[in-house]
Image: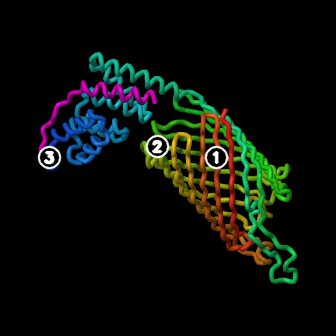
């Protein structure tokens, strides 16, 4: 916040010193160019930057390329919090008038906001050659301090350690249909009726994460997560789970707005205190800020899953793409889509053989205040197996299993301080299937308390 205030104050100081030659132009627009510039300057001087920006943007198709117009358009964009628009306009100015000190100084502020520190330093170095007046030189010196501070912050090694306790209710911990007779329409009908059952539960979760940044833009990240779930329904105790997951990543920034990383990961799951499944994998991730509002993420992974019952072992290839759009300071939209392909690795393999999963989800995040958020999700998933199977769950008839599920979730997060976080979420999932046994619905409700060290 302090740096943004300093940047705005410095840029405001140099605007008064700026003088750029006016190019007389006739225009078919309602206002002539001198009128546009004068009206925009008046709006800027009376703290109406949004109006000035709207005015200049309206006339950009007509006057773009005119250095005087582009300069004031860039100034209005800076004041309105539109650094990308500002950079385009101001770069047009210096393309035609390389000695335009005001445009270059404005660009310094823009590049700092966009975290393009190398570009900001190049402008400062050029400004040093122009024998700037005292006030402008003071602004240049202050900008150099800010750039140095940003670089120092970029080499810091942030960390996060948290401990959480969850209390929840699961309406269908078995993932069973509401009621299913394994021997329906046979002489054994009624002997094996499977029904959905519920349980309350407690989770204890811990997480440790740290990132090491190097001055050249490379970095390394490590994380360790652990969770223990205790089901309170005595019959559900055989599904008590313990999970440990660790990951290590190395990566590098690409340009000013993108990041590429590679990682190793591994996990172990225990079911009812007995080893159930282990997993190791390789991952790759890419993240890029397209502009201040749009962000794109892509991930890929290869994982190997080994079970205590070896016949269930499989390897999996996965990939997903996520788009994030900041609609306003209060609303962020996200969309995600991906696929998982599971390939069995044993001759005597799990029922159904290989499987392919496709998923897509839409999210809307609402930032009600600095400490209040509401996160919403609507997701769809399709899962299809390659081989005939599941006869024991289908009245003796083997079939190709194909599932479709829809999930809806709403979560409220409250953060009264930097150390405490409280959350409550509710989730509903409904699944249909080509094999009736796998038709189900499930509701989850959970409250959590997290302390961040």
Q: Nearer the viewer, residue 211 or 192?
A: 192
Compare marks 1 and 3 and give the one earlier in the sequence.
3
Q: Identify residue for label 3.
A: 27
Q: Neighbour class for label 2 at 10 Å: few (<14), some, many (≥20)?
A: some
Q: Identify residue for label 2.
A: 289
Whether residue 10 appears in magenta in the rendering, the answer is yes
Q: Are marks 1 and 3 in contact (CB under 8 Å)?
A: no
Q: Secondary structure at mark 2?
A: strand
Is 278 located above or below residue 386 in the figure? above
Q: Name the residue located 54 percent from the left edge and 54 percent from the top edge.
A: 363
Q: Which mark is residue 423?
A: 1
Q: Nearer the viewer, residue 342 or 143?
A: 143
Q: How many marks?
A: 3
Instruction: Single out the mark in the foreground, 3 or 2.
Output: 3
Instruction: Single out the mark in the foreground, 1 or 3.
Output: 1
Q: Neighbour class for label 3 at 10 Å: few (<14), some, many (≥20)?
A: few
Q: Are marks 1 and 2 in contact (CB under 8 Å)?
A: no
Q: Secondary structure at mark 1?
A: strand
| Mark 1 vs mark 3, CA separation in Å | 57 Å
State which region is magenta.
1-26
Q: Position of residue 131 (x, y in %)?
A: 27, 17
């Amino acid at each position: 916040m302090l740096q943004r205030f300093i940047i705005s104050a410095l840029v405001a100081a140099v605007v008064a010193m700026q003088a750029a030659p006016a190019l007389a132009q006739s225009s078919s627009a309602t206002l002539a160019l001198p009128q546009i510039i004068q009206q925009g300057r008046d709006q800027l001087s009376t703290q109406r930057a949004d109006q000035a920006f709207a005015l200049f943007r309206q006339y950009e198709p007509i006057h773009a390329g005119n250095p005087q117009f582009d300069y004031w358009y860039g100034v209005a964009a800076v004041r309105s919090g539109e650094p990308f628009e500002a950079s385009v306009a101001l770069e047009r100015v210096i393309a035609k008038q390389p000695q335009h000190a005001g445009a270059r100084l404005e660009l310094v502020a823009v590049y700092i906001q966009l975290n393009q520190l190398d570009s900001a330093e190049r402008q400062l170095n050029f400004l040093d050659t122009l024998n700037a007046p005292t006030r402008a030189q003071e602004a240049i010196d202050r900008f150099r301090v800010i750039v140095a501070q940003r670089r120092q912050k970029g080499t810091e090694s942030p960390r996060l350690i948290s401990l959480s306790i969850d209390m929840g209710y699961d309406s269908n911990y078995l993932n069973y249909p509401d009621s299913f007779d394994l021997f329906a329409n046979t002489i054994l009908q009624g002997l094996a009726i499977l029904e959905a059952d519920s349980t309350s539960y407690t989770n204890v979760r811990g997480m440790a994460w740290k990132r090491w940044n190097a001055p050249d833009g490379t970095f390394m990240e490590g994380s360790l997560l652990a969770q223990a779930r205790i089901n309170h329904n005595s019959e559900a105790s055989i599904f008590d789970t313990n999970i440990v997951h660790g990951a290590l990543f190395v990566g590098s920034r690409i340009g000013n707005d993108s990041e590429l990383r590679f990682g190793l990961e591994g996990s172990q799951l225990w079911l009812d205190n007995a080893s159930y499944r282990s997993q190791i994998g390789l991952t790759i991730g890419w993240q890029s800020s397209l502009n201040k509002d749009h962000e794109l993420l892509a991930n890929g992974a290869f994982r190997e899953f080994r079970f205590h019952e070896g016949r269930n072992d499989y390897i999996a290839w996965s990939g997903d793409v996520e788009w994030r759009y900041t609609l306003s300071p209060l609303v962020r939209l996200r969309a995600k889509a991906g696929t998982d392909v599971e390939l069995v690795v044993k001759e005597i393999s799990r029922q159904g053989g290989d499987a392919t999963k496709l998923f897509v989800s839409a999210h809307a995040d609402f930032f009600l205040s600095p400490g209040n958020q509401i996160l919403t999700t609507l997701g769809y998933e399709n899962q299809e197996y390659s081989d005939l199977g599941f006869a024991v769950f289908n009245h003796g008839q083997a079939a190709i299993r194909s599932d479709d599920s829809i999930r809806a979730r709403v979560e409220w997060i409250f953060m009264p301080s930097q150390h405490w976080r409280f959350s409550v979420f509710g989730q509903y999932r409904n699944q249909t299937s080509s094999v009736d046994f796998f038709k189900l619905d499930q509701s989850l409700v959970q409250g959590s308390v997290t302390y961040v060290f």
